[in-house]
Amino acid sequence: MKKTAAAALGLSGLLLAGCFDIEQTLTLEKDMSGKAGYSMKLDMEPMVGFMARMKRSMEGKEGDPTPEEIAAAKQEMLASRKSQTKDMPVDKKEIAKQLPKGVTLLDSSVKEEGLGMAMSFLFGFDNVSKLKEINLKKPETETKEAQEMGPGPGAEGPNPAESPFKGLQVVDEGDTFLVISPAENPVAEQSEQASQMELSPEEKKQVQEMLGNLRVAFKITTPFQIVEHNAHRKEGNTLVWEYNLDNMEKMTPEQLAQGVRVRYKK
């Protein structure tokens, strides 16, 4: 079975995203102030064995990977995780300095353990329109350490936590207002690459199991009357949108662009 290095990296990126659990929350008050939360969990442990087997296949080897090969794959995954977060500030004071005027950091947490990582941020804002201006990427990213580390497998593309609300739009319509935020498929390009690869039935099953862990959710809680919405479910005053790779791949570009869409009466 022939696999090119480029295709392998594409699949690596796909599987890496399959380990993501991302949730955004928005609590909006009558004066359009409120709180916004962003959390991201990443567990790369499930893909270590698969990546070790794929590397063996690329080298023309057969059979299961050795303990040494699995250990090497784990180290590569650790490097990949570090490259995903190397441009993210972790100190609360450092984060606060980068926030736009009118947005404050109420709480933050970054935890790393083995191949797992969890980060969360809670922001306060005086107007919801300020949220799209949040950018947590460090101003100076080309550090000596980052250059020596390299991109790592599956590390291509921006970290989704850098600009957590960049696509959020709030449109004033007079008596009503519209909230829109895109449902971004984090692995559209890699998914297309993977579909063109020659995988055995067992490999396809393993890929689907790992991709099944991808979760992207958005929750909005407000005291406003809902006029219309396309949320997946409603829990009291909270609307919930929840996506996985399967339902995002079935959405049209227009549906993805308006993934979260709700109209409220003022």
Image: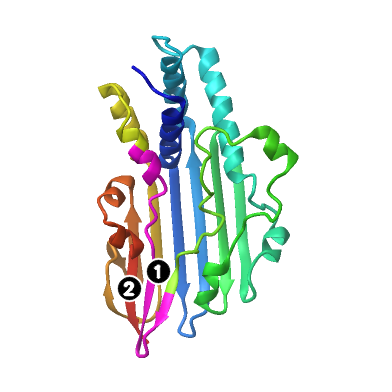
The image quarter in which residue 47 lies: top left
Q: In this view, does 44 lie above or below 252?
A: above
Q: How crowded is mark 2: few (under 14 residues within 10 Å), some or many (20 or more)?
A: many
**Residue 225: percent from the left, percent from the top?**
32, 82
Quick one: quadrant of the N terminus?
Answer: top left
The CA distance from mark 2 to mark 1 is 9 Å
Whether residue 184 appears in magenta in the rendering, the answer is: yes
Q: Position of residue 75 (x, y in %)?
A: 58, 26
Q: In which quarter of the image is residue 138?
A: bottom right
The three-letter code of the residue at mark 1 reads Ile
Q: Mark 2 is on which residue type?
A: Val
Task: Identify whether 12 is placed above or below 255.
Answer: above
For this orientation, the residue located farthest to the top is: 62
Mark 1 = which residue?
A: 220
Q: What element carries label 2?
A: strand
- Compared with 128, 250 (above or below) is above
SS at mark 1 in the image: strand
| Of marks 2 and 1, the one in the foreground | 2
Residue at point 32%, 24% (across, down): 203
Between 254 and 35, the one nearer to me in the picture = 254
Q: How many marks?
A: 2
On screen, 188 above or below 255? above
Q: Is residue 147 magenta?
A: no
> Dots 2 and 1: beta carbons under 8 Å?
yes
Position in image of residue 207 (x %, y %): 34, 31
Q: Which of marks 2 and 1 is nearer the N terminus?
A: 1
Magenta range is 170-192
